[in-house]
Amino acid sequence: MPGRLMRGLWQRWRRYRYRFVPWIALNLSHNPRTLRYVPEESKDKVISDEDVLGTLLKVFQALFVNDFSKESDILTVLPEPVKSKYQDLLSVQHPRVKQLEYRHQQQNTFTPEEILYKTLGFSVARAPSSLISAGKGVFVTKGLVQKGAVVSMYPGTVYQKYEPIFFQSIGNPFIFRCLDGVLIDGNDKGISKVVYRSCHGRDRLGPLKMSDSTWLTSEIHNPLAIGQYVNNCSNDRAANVCYQEFDVPAVFPIELKQYLPNIAYSYDRQSPLRCVVLVALRDIEQGEELFSNYYTIVS
């Protein structure tokens, strides 16, 4: 019995250590490929914020149009020009639908993964990692990810440096630290899950959802929201993606916020919502696992 317990603890440690900051710090000399060198914090951008925004809007709009028949409550509170824009997009994809009585029409819808493939030319999904004892990882399941593409997002509750996260952090391998000290808790279980759901319900405005909570379930509406399962690179597996911070601009369409997999721990209208995306460092082919370098050295 004690032997079985020790083996279980050892297996858990072997999975957790790849995200445990002190362990990685002590092993940097043995694992130099886990670091990314950045000359200044302001230059930690592989692609521009405009490119990140453009990709997210493209995917989210496609998801919105795909679920058009379910968005009647949201459309009732949107201005007419916005309704017309989506009606035009819908007409391109479904030429037979001519009127706003779309909820009475029968139309074929695609899965979020199919929408991602049709929009960006690839799809990604979670699966057992190719690294021994590393748990789950993220793989390109279809298509080709081109260099510079946004390949996934890091979901979770966003904490400022001064906000409490002690209890959520205990045994939690999914806490991401941004360059300015902002933390994102991407754990989809336990206290972290409860906190996110609470904040998600707090910020809802009638039919308008300010964030996506489906990444906490098995039926994810935003297929990009699996970045917390991307494993760290190693000497044998070089990084093919890297993390890039992105602040959601104030002009972000309110009807598309339902697909943002992040929410602020404290309600604050003044601070922009922090998101983190993963950007491809090279072309990534179908069947490849995504590997990132978690820790960045700013010189």
Image: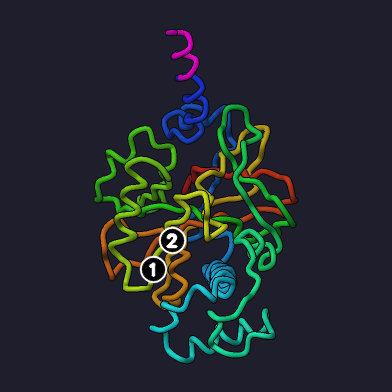
Picture coordinates of residue 77 (x, y %)?
38, 83
**Mark 2 Cα-neighbour bin, 10 Å: few <14, some 14–19, many ≥20:** many
In which image quadrant can residue 165 be found? top left
Q: Is residue 267 left or right of residue 149?
A: left
Question: What secondary structure is found at the residue carrying circle 1?
Answer: loop
Q: Is residue 215 magenta?
A: no
Residue placed under numbered mark 1 in the picture: 209
Q: Say if mark 2 contacts mark 1, CB within 8 Å.
A: yes
Which of 151 and 28 lies nearest the eye of the viewer? 151
Residue placed under numbered mark 2 in the picture: 212
Identify the disc placed on residue 65. Answer: none
User: Residue at the spot x=50%, y=15% of the render?
Assistant: 7
Q: Is residue 2 magenta?
A: yes
Question: What secondary structure is found at the residue carrying circle 2?
Answer: loop
- Looking at the picture, does residue 224 appear above or below residue 269? above
Please say whether residue 119 is visible from this viewpoint.
yes
Picture coordinates of residue 285 (x, y %)?
75, 51
Q: How many marks?
A: 2
Q: CA distance from mark 2 to mark 1?
A: 7 Å
Which of 258 and 299 lies nearest the eye of the viewer? 258
**Mark 1 Cα-neighbour bin, 10 Å: few <14, some 14–19, many ≥20:** many
Q: Amino acid at mark 1?
A: Lys
User: Residue at the spot x=41%, y=77% of the render?
Assistant: 73
Q: How is the image coloured?
A: rainbow
Picture coordinates of residue 242 (x, y %)?
57, 50
Segment tinted magenta in the rendering: 1-8
Which of 234 and 257 lies nearest the eye of the viewer? 257
